[in-house]
Image: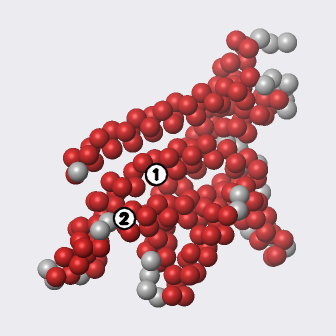
Amino acid sequence: MSTWLEQFPVVVSALNEGFLQTMKLFFVTLIGAVPLGLLISLASMSSFKPLKWLSRGIVYVIRGTPLMIQLLIIFYFPGLILGNNIWGGGESGRFLAAAIAFIINYACYFSEIFRGGIQGIPAGQEEAGLVLGMTKSQIFFKIKLLQMIKRIVPPMANEIITLVKDTSLARIIAMQEIIWAGYSFMKGSHGISGVIWPLFFTGVYYLICNGLLSFLFNRLEQKLNFFR
């Protein structure tokens, strides 16, 4: 039976591959969820009632149900309805389904943060902009946006750090992220079986990644303090 020192290079190589998949899902989710969340927040504040209540209804459902269930529904439900798995059986299909589920889920959470940031800006600033002849879009981009960013950095930082850890839920549809890679060594992956330490070792990757994110967000908050 090989020792952990002999197993270490094989384990780290597999975990690195899993972590790259985790980071890929993380960045794709951010790229998709941030702009979508802003659109949903604007829709939820719209004066057009059907759009307002539709967007708020979607946010209510998504925030009120577990992400794991949403992953299962998005991956398996089309196949149950159409009789054919639209995602295919490969890793790329599983990644696409996971990315869509994560983007929708986090866009709804981000939308509430955006909405709170926008509505927290005093109404007098918009009124002053209108008096000066500015349009609502000019008021938003030239007056409200920077103030909103400053207000939402702490809650957004918390959600983004949570996103890193939530990527582990993608294993429910057998997407091979880092937790999947660590767990596989208990089942006989790469000729190693019954070994549990790689699963615990995955925590080091999360700690390093979230430590770096915390550092970057702290620096960003310090920079934005200039606008007090």
Q: Residue at x 65, y 30 (%)?
A: 202
Residue holding disc 1: 155
- Quadrant location, the N terminus: top right
Name the N-terminal-most of marks 1 and 2: 2
Q: Which label was assigned to residue 216?
A: none
What distance separates the C-alpha of mark 1 from that of mark 2? 14 Å
Q: Position of residue 45 (x, y in %)?
A: 44, 77
Q: Residue at x 57, y 48 (%)?
A: 163
Q: Is residue 222 visible?
A: yes
Report the front residue among 198 and 151: 151
Provide the secondary structure element on which disc 2 rests. Answer: loop
Q: Is residue 39 left or right of residue 228?
A: right
Residue holding disc 2: 120
Q: Name which quarter of the figure residue 130 lies in.
A: bottom left
Q: Name which quarter of the figure residue 190 lies in.
A: top right
Q: Residue at x 78, y 34 (%)?
A: 184
Q: Is residue 88 visible?
A: no
For residue 10, above or below residue 52: above
Report the front residue among 205 and 140: 140
Residue furthest left in the image: 132
Q: Position of residue 116 (x, y in %)?
A: 43, 64
Badge 1 amino acid: Pro
Badge 2 amino acid: Gly
Q: Position of residue 121 (x, y in %)?
A: 32, 66
Q: How is the image coloured?
A: secondary structure
For residue 146, above or below residue 6: below
The mark closer to the camera, 1 or 2, is: 2
Report the front residue among 33 and 79: 33
Q: Position of residue 210 (x, y in %)?
A: 51, 36
Q: Residues within 10 Å of mark 2 (few under 14, many from 20)?
A: few
Q: Is residue 61 left or right of residue 54?
A: right
